[in-house]
Image (cartoon, coloured by chain):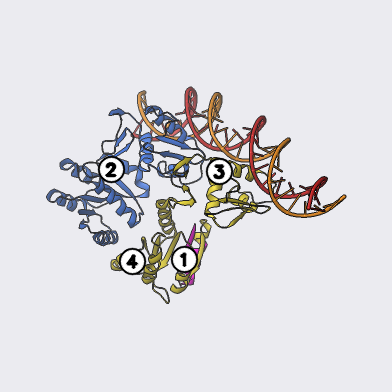
Chain colours: A yellow, B blue, C red, D orange
Amino acid sequence: MHILIVEDELGIVQFLEQGLREEGYKITTANDGSKAFELTQNHKFDLILLDWMIPKINGLDLCKAIRIKDQKTPIIFLTAKDTVRETIEGLKAGANDYIKKPFSFEELVERIKIHFRNKGGSEALSLGTIKIDLSKHIVLKNDEEIALTQREFELLTYLIQNKGKVCTRNQILKDVWDINFEYDTGVIDVFMNAIRKKLKLKIEEDYIKTIRSVGYIANDL
Amino acid sequence: MHILIVEDELGIVQFLEQGLREEGYKITTANDGSKAFELTQNHKFDLILLDWMIPKINGLDLCKAIRIKDQKTPIIFLTAKDTVRETIEGLKAGANDYIKKPFSFEELVERIKIHFRNKGGSEALSLGTIKIDLSKHIVLKNDEEIALTQREFELLTYLIQNKGKVCTRNQILKDVWDINFEYDTGVIDVFMNAIRKKLKLKIEEDYIKTIRSVGYIANDL
DNA sequence: AAAATTAACCTTAAGCAAACATTAAGTATA
DNA sequence: TATACTTAATGTTTGCTTAAGGTTAATTTT
């Protein structure tokens, strides 16, 4: 889960960054509005924490600007102003939630979790005619359900989440199997075989391509 | 659509009032139980948001009092995390739903819409031929009443409220048992077994499906 | 350039461990 | 003290991993 923190006060940034890192989130920070906007146009975040008062572009305008292209990513406002009017402005501009300074760290984490809970990973992953619904935990090919085991599901999801990028065998072992050391095993091959078989993907088809002596890559055609 | 907000904390009242006004609802507020009761006797509301802890009359008694004359108007409890267990009392007392603090504004609006969507009585949860009446605390299968214990009821309700979404074992432990740490226990299995047995759900039937090494999912067929 | 060699990958099947189902006994609760 | 909840023990199923043999592709040798 990748969170963007947009805040200019260094103390708060460090506090949030360190704390949220410990919670297991990947963090990127921006200390002014224009830098933040640039980041949002080139990267995908799972959630944005946005201070109301930031240099160059104010939080409200930044929120509106982000929402032009992206209606989905949850935006939570951090603000010292506790007047209701501005809350509403923020919500109208497309923010999803609002938290008043000073806030407890626990409170913030709770709020963040709420937003991830609702999302439930409902973003639909796809690869050609293959669709993955994470919240239902099903895989469809041409709208027909394909039963995969847990590991098969995880591996396929991983490849599709990294669509267009080569996944090396070591990366796969690390991210799917949690094996962080050099280890010669054939599991990946076995599972790739199972996935291709169940999804009826011929090897010469390029949806999932073998990169010999490197790894695998998933690609729409 | 006219909503009554019963809450004593001014900040929350204002936040809710303005936010819901923006959503197009007509809003009336009351900051204590007796004032709220008076309002309900002289006006008709389409929905009531009710804090658990309010001055003069507590939320639970107020709920009961309202239900003497009026069985229809949806009542949603706003409740702090650590009183969820008591909220079940609230549901028995005639509330239709509850929402845990802290909640996101979005989440609240979603819940409100759900109640307006299926208006025409208390919200009936269902799964195939299984029906749950939250206000009566009753489970029916093919119109025949099935006696469930409290925990069984809560677990089944939870699964059906999240129909179509996978409920992980950790989520279930957290939301039904309020166990927020990693803990190896077999309770879930025992209760799933009891529910399936009492409702005569065969494992190979997909109303409640086991997702191995993830959790369970409820589904209409 | 063809054949032989090697290395990486594909495929299959069997053993084994983990996850789940089920039952019963112990513990808490109302 | 009876009912419901939890833990523990046992049985069952599922699927992960290993291992072994077959295939393909790249490299080296002839």
Q: Earlier in the sequence, mark 1 or mark 3?
A: 1
Which of the numbered marks, if any, corresponds to residue A5? 1
The residue at which mark 4 appears reads as: A93
Against B74, is B16 above or below?
below
Viewed as shown, does residue A165 lie left or right of B152? Answer: right
Q: Nearer the viewer, mark 3 or mark 4?
A: 3
Identify the amino acid type marked 1.
Ile
Structural distance between the alpha carbons of marks 1 and 4: 18 Å
Identify the amino acid type marked 2.
Gly
Which region of the structure is painted magenta? Answer: A1-18
Q: Earlier in the sequence, mark 3 or mark 4?
A: 4
Chain for numbered disc 4: A
Identify the amino acid type marked 3.
Glu
Q: Position of residue B212 (x, y in %)?
A: 51, 38
Chain for numbered disc 2: B
Label 2 environment density (alpha carbons within 10 Å; few <14, some 14–19, many ≥20):
many
Q: Secondary structure at mark 2?
A: helix
Q: Answer yes or no: are tags 3 and 4 on the same subunit.
A: yes
Q: Position of residue A101 (x, y in %)?
A: 39, 66
Structural distance between the alpha carbons of marks 1 and 2: 39 Å
Q: Residue A13: say if magenta.
A: yes
Which of the numbered marks, if any, corresponds to residue A152? 3
- The front one of D22 and A41 is D22
Q: Secondary structure at mark 3?
A: helix
Structural distance between the alpha carbons of marks 2 and 4: 36 Å
Q: Secondary structure at mark 4?
A: loop
